[in-house]
Amino acid sequence: MNDETLVLKGEMSEVLRLMKKTFYSNEEIFLRELINNASNALDKIQFERLMNNSVLNDELIITLIPHKVNKTLSIIDNGIGMTKMDLVDNLGIGFYSAYLVAEKVILTSKHNDHDQYTLEFQPSASFIVTKDINAQQLPRGTKITLFLKDHQMLVYTFKLESPYIYRRIAIG
């Protein structure tokens, strides 16, 4: 499959701008949103395990990997993963909250029954979806890498207090 560049409708880029200005006055909310998304993916694969014994039985975990030199933060889960259509059609406000602190986001995902895809999202409201055959393959799950804005520090207080998250979170 060739790279596929998709452009968001004009209204969407305006929604991103308004979201930054209106919904999230606290920039650190992005981390809670992305961890909630990862936790939901773990819940989905856990449910699938109950229905289908052939699903891998590995430990379900969310990993945060800060990289100070590159100014990146990666959030990795081994949940259900996303298909190409999920990447194109089903990204929600939690994903877009990453733009409170990031100038660029790369999302790589692998669903059990599908190929691995990478979505590279630019603030210009365009994104590229690529069948990812060259990168390190995920067994299953999603990796989101945030390229933090210049004025952002990679030192966040990872205040992970949420009544909805009961998953193991590793910082590595």
Image (tube, rainbow, N blue to C red):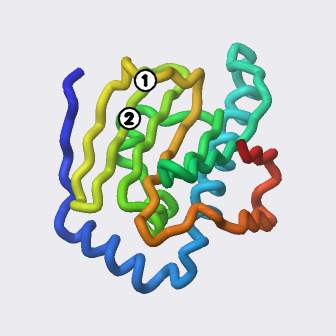
Task: Look at label 1 and name its amino acid.
Answer: Ala
Front one among 33 and 123: 123
Q: Quadrant of the N terminus?
A: top left
Secondary structure beneath dot 2 equals strand
Residue at 55 percent across and 67 percent down: it is: 153
Can you say whether 172 is above or below 93 in the image? above
Front one among 129 and 9: 129
- Whichever of callouts 1 and 2 sits on the residue coming sooner in the sequence is 2
Is mark 1 in CB contact (under 8 Å) with mark 2? yes
Image coordinates for residue 57, horizontal then vertical, percent: 77, 21
Residue at 69 percent across and 40 percent down: it is: 42
According to the picture, the residue beneath numbered tag 1 turns out to be: 135
Image coordinates for residue 165, horizontal then vertical, percent: 77, 57
User: Viewed as shown, does residue 101 lie left or right of 36?
Assistant: left
Tell me if residue 93 can be seen: no
User: Viewed as shown, does residue 16 lie left or right of 61?
Assistant: left
Q: Quadrant of the C terminus?
A: top right
Residue at 45 percent across and 22 percent down: it is: 114
According to the picture, the residue beneath numbered tag 2 turns out to be: 118
Front one among 67 and 36: 67
